[in-house]
Image: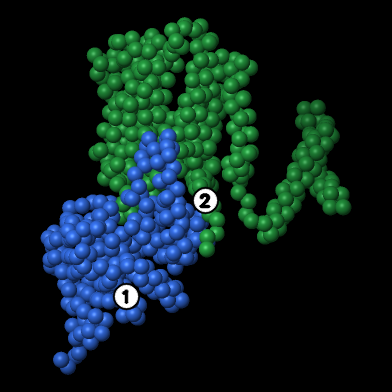
Chain colours: A blue, B green
Amino acid sequence: MNTQILKVNGLTMDFGGIRALNSLDLDVNRGEIVALIGPNGAGKTTFFNCITGIYAPTEGEVYLAAPGSDTSVSLKGLKPNQVTEKGLARTFQNIRLFAKMTVLENVMIGRHCRTKAFVLGAVFRNKATRDEEQSILETSYAILQKVGLEQYVNEFANNLPYGAQRRLEVARALATEPLLLLLDEPAAGMNPQETIELEKLIKEISSEGQSILLIEHDMTLVMSLSDRIFVMDYGKKIAEGTPVEIRENPAVIKAYLGEDVDA
Amino acid sequence: MLLIKELKKALGVALWFVFLTFPIMVIKVDPIERIIRYRWENAAYVAIVTFTVYLVMSFIKLRKLRVTADKKESKPSRNVIHSILNNKKQLAVLSFMILAIALVFPHFFSVYQTNVMTTALMYVVLGLGLNIVVGMAGLLDLGFVAFYAVGAYSYALLNYHFGLGFWVVLPIGGALAAIFGIILGFPVLRLRGDYLAIVTLGFGEIIRLILENWGEFSQGPSGISNISRPGFFGMDFSLETSIMYMYYIMVIGVIVTIFIVNRLQDSRLGRAWIALREDEIACQAMGIDKRKTKLAAFSLGAFWAGLIGVVFAAKTTFINPASFTFLESAIILSIVVLGGMGSIIGVIIGAFILILMPEYLRALSEYRMLAFGGVMVAMMVFRPQGMIANIRRTYKFEKQK
């Protein structure tokens, strides 16, 4: 099997005259945690929206490894739900849970693309549908246990504390059995304690072989979690490497802190 | 002790009020006869009314105090209906009772009452159908009556031209309406909220205008008459029995609808609808096919409207486009909104209130729309979730290690 799970070639996205992404290359290997960082407005979330099919990129190719084989599939032109079906699941920067559904149901929605009962199944509740429903329940509950939300099972999602809502987003994405999990600023707005717990959770998920690509502003978290880091600014990739390399990279320092006046 | 104290207080208040109102209530100067009349009976009325009002008020106050005290200790109580719905035994007893009442209803009440009840039951099904589209999937549909018209006209025309019977056309009418639901669904897949409402409103009007103006097809505004009533293995009924028969058909129809809608709500598809209502982008990102899910909602909602359309045509034996105006859509939508979006029991109660109230308050019929509007505004202000808000199913898990 190939080691690359996601391969992005020359991804470009124009909004009218603004080039939000400029010929971006990125790759994620199996089992890796890769971080995508950059100043505000660098185009990180746009990048996520492009590869998950919410935006149609102007140019460029996105390939995702096909499960169980050596080939990869192009994600170009697929709808968001088809992308998820192919194995790319994401969370959102601004939490987008289904507020008036219970915590368990939120996760059960994640199982949607891996199950298939439809109108007739729902009405007649034949054996296959009942079994499927049971398996949805069990898997969803197991995922909730994994992220530590099992005490909230029947709670409405919008009644959860903030940190728990973030975890629920992760749980919901995990329920789709993704090959690659995209986390869009999972630690945004969290207090230090919640961030530590989140770090533990991400490490735990990763230790089970889950490949992860995350956008994050919390540098301590990024440095301790990631195997590799990509740095973006103004829609361009300005650096790429291990956390140590990135920390010393002059281009990165320049992007974040500005240029020295004397230079 | 408390009671005596309250009684004494109430007596004091009553006497005080009698004293205060004495000049206007009791004394009456008669300028013609030049005498003063003392209407002592009025003093008695004032005393009695004040006394009772005061007692009732203090009783309410006491209860409030007690309830807030209780709340601190026990969990916040849900309302009565929810607690009944959650208790399987109570639910079974209640539904059995309702079923029993429904079954004997036409034998104890007049034909008129039975007819009114049949109409109410029809609206229950219409409400439940629209509830799929508006309540669950969150797609505001203002042209629901179009599907109702499709069902009614498919029976009327098939009966008129080919002499097809009620039971044959019933599924055809439903299916045709479902197809129209998909036809409407396709162009509005991308629309949401207000824009969707406008397009569906237009769709409803288009169907009505076609029926009104395409004379060769639908016989225009003069409508189609002499539509045959439902038969029962070739038997012919008298008018009275056929009204009763219609009633029983609707009772069965309502039961089947509740059963199916309930199952849909708790299914994978039902969850997808609700997710779609909550957040369309997140819903797609979680792998739900927006197109398939929306079309399913539109066509299933329309299906029920089509079935009831067929029933309507068979019940009235005469239809014309005037029965399918926007007002009809508005009433069905009000049933859903008033009862509680997404809540099956809420929609049922909403339908009964909105259909039966005008029927039994005919004396006030001039003020019907006024009252209707007032109720809707009050509802939106005080209880936007509807009379009976939908509650989600809860699951229990055994603690695993």
Q: Toward the viewer: B340 or B75?
A: B75
Residue on which disc 1 sits: A217
Quarter-of-image position of residue A241: bottom left
Q: Is residue B351 left or right of residue A83?
A: right
Quarter-of-image position of residue B307: top left
Identify which amino acid the numbered label 1 is placed on: His
Residue drawn 27% across the image and 40% down it: B188
Q: Toward the viewer: B174 or B326?
A: B174
- Labelled disc at residue A151: none
Q: Toward the viewer: A143 or B272?
A: A143
Quarter holding the N terminus of chain A is: bottom left
Is residue A135 positioned above or below A31 on the image? Answer: above
Is residue B286 positioned above or below B309 on the image? Answer: below
Q: Is residue B91 left or right of residue B314?
A: right
Residue drawn 61% across the image and 25% down it: B100
Task: Report whether mark 2 lies on the same chain as mark 1.
Answer: no
Identify which amino acid the numbered label 2 is placed on: Tyr
Label 2: state its secondary structure.
loop
Q: Is residue A154 left or right of residue B107?
A: left
Chain letter, disc 1 residue? A
Q: Is residue A187 visible?
A: no
